[in-house]
Image (cartoon, rainbow, N blue to C red):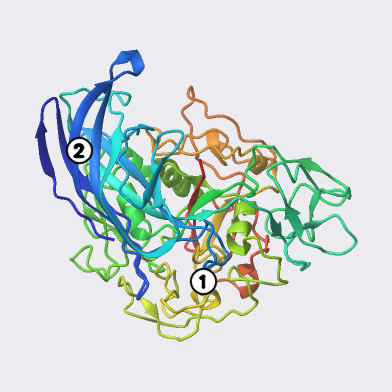
Amino acid sequence: MKNYSPNTLINKPGILLIVSILVFLLNIPTYANNISINNIRITGQNTEAGVNNSANFSQIQFDISWENSWRKDLTGANYAAPYNYDAAWIFIKYRIAGGVWQHATLNTTGNSVPAGSVISIASDKKGAFMYRSSNGTGTNNWTGTQLRWYYNLDGVTDDANIEVNVYAIEMVFVPQGSFYVGDGNTDSKQFNTTSTTITPYQITSESVPSTLGGNTVGNMRNSNNVGTGADDFNNTTTKSLLASFPKGFNAFYCMKYELTQQAYVNFLNTLTYTQQVTRTAYLPNKAAGTAALSNSYRNGIQIMTPGVSATTPAVYACNYTDDTNYNNSDDGQNIACNYLEWQDLAAYYDWSGLRPMTELEYEKACRGSLASVDGEYAWGTTNIYAITDVSNPGDNNEISTNVGKNSSYNNNIVGNGPLRVGVFATATATREVAGAGYYGIMELSGNLWETAVTVGIAAGRSFTGKNGDGNLNTSGDANVDFWPGINGNNTATNACTAYSVSTGIGVTESAGIGVRGGAFNNDKALLRTSSRAYAEANDCGTRTYNVSGRGVRVAQ
């Protein structure tokens, strides 16, 4: 990840903006995507008919590029399944006169689309997906991209002094379609059909399953209801699943990688002091070099500039080498971020306009439209090979020293901890060797546990798939209706509810969230796509050395 901060002072009639850029770069040796945003500038201000007939807009212009992009979802004899594409989720933060960072609202029209690209503004206007307009592979290099900021709607006046950060996160498009959950194995309470044998269950629309448990044809049940926590449905007890609960049939975008340490640093550096207190393990006013989360298990996030209690937030940086120099290329920016509790992840998703994935979406991201394979991992086979050591530890080109390895589990890695995201991918790697899911999403099996909303308890089943709006409450917590743990819900049997503005309690607990996919310290059986041993994990509300996650967003 690179941090371009030109701090350019834009002088123009009516509005004054200071532009800085923060970009999520996820680098893969010989297969680097190198997503970057450059040349940000404000190109114009105007007034159009809109709210009260005086809707003020400003064009935010930038260049965006990334390597090894693809699209193969349109008609074409030269392309084989999966028919999907990659994209960038782009969103903007701003602050007025050095105040609190806020999320910018985009306009659905008036955006400038470079040749060869598509810009799709989200229906809630909290960001935009950008991707190829036609089939192809290679480098995207789009100049003069313009997003229209609806700054009047955000309460910004024409004479305000504004600082703007532009972010881009690499995503993968998961298309609409049927898929299977469960693989026919009897372990770990995995999903199956209501039959005399354990058979994978096929999800064929967003309206099914509507009933969990029981023995009626069409219901989805579990094969062996054991593990940490337990489903509240079984062969005789049934539960209903909301029509609005995201079942994975509909198309969605998913972060290609688990949340990285640099991504979490960027998030922390937009929070107030009070919010930083909530989202870190150590007070932000501690000395430079103090860990933000932990100084063990390969987590290198540290305080670079101490904050001032209650007033001035700290500045965080990556320092995997634990020396006096921060943000060097070997400081672990692209190592997956561990020591995150569910509340931290929920806050990050809300802040970026994303949402958590459900455990049904998790299985689709792994398996795609293919039939289940008994005991398979995210890459679609039962073959798994443990990495034991890396070259260039902590560097942007950290890579396995063991040829042909595709996962991290059983504490086999020297120095125990998560690896750089995409560590197994190369230009010539197969899906199995790269450790990739069906659609090209990385590290769904191993490295760190994936947090996912469970269907096994009432607190999870109340989730409606609502996206984050980009803004947290004053405590630094997510405040999205029906998210697991909202309003301090820590009781599995209680459905999560809409956010209570009167109490102001956001996602401060974890009822309804679980983990899938296993981690670097687990037995390989827990890395299987359909394993639900910890689908209702009861310890996601504490920071854990082997848990992370990735956000998703419905395709709109």
Q: In the displayed structure, would residue 79 be above or below residue 60?
A: below
Are there few (<14), some (14-19), or many (20+) residues within 10 Å of tag 1?
many
In which quarter of the view is residue 190 placed?
bottom right
Element class at badge 1: loop
Q: Quick one: which residue is furthest to the top in this view?
A: 52
Pick the front one: 98 or 342: 98
419 on left or right of 481: left
Give the position of the N terminus as an image quadrant: bottom left
Q: Amino acid at mark 1?
A: Phe
Marked residue nearer the N-terminal end (1 or 2): 2
Crowding at mark 2 (Cα within 10 Å: few <14, some 14-19, many 20+): many
Q: How many marks can you see?
A: 2
Quadrant position of residue 25 = bottom left
Q: Which residue is disc 2 drawn over? A: 163
Labelled disc at residue 520:
1
Where residue 83 appears, x then y in whole percent? Answer: 55, 60
Q: Position of residue 441 (x, y in %)?
A: 50, 62
Helix, strand or loop at mark 2? strand
Residue drawn at point x = 82 percent, y = 64 percent: 198
Q: Is residue 480 above or below residue 229?
A: above
Q: Is residue 343 visible?
A: yes
How far is disc 1 from disc 2 in space, using C-alphas? 40 Å
Q: Residue at x 63, y 50 (%)?
A: 248
Residue 34 vertical position relative to residue 129 in the rendered view, above or below: below
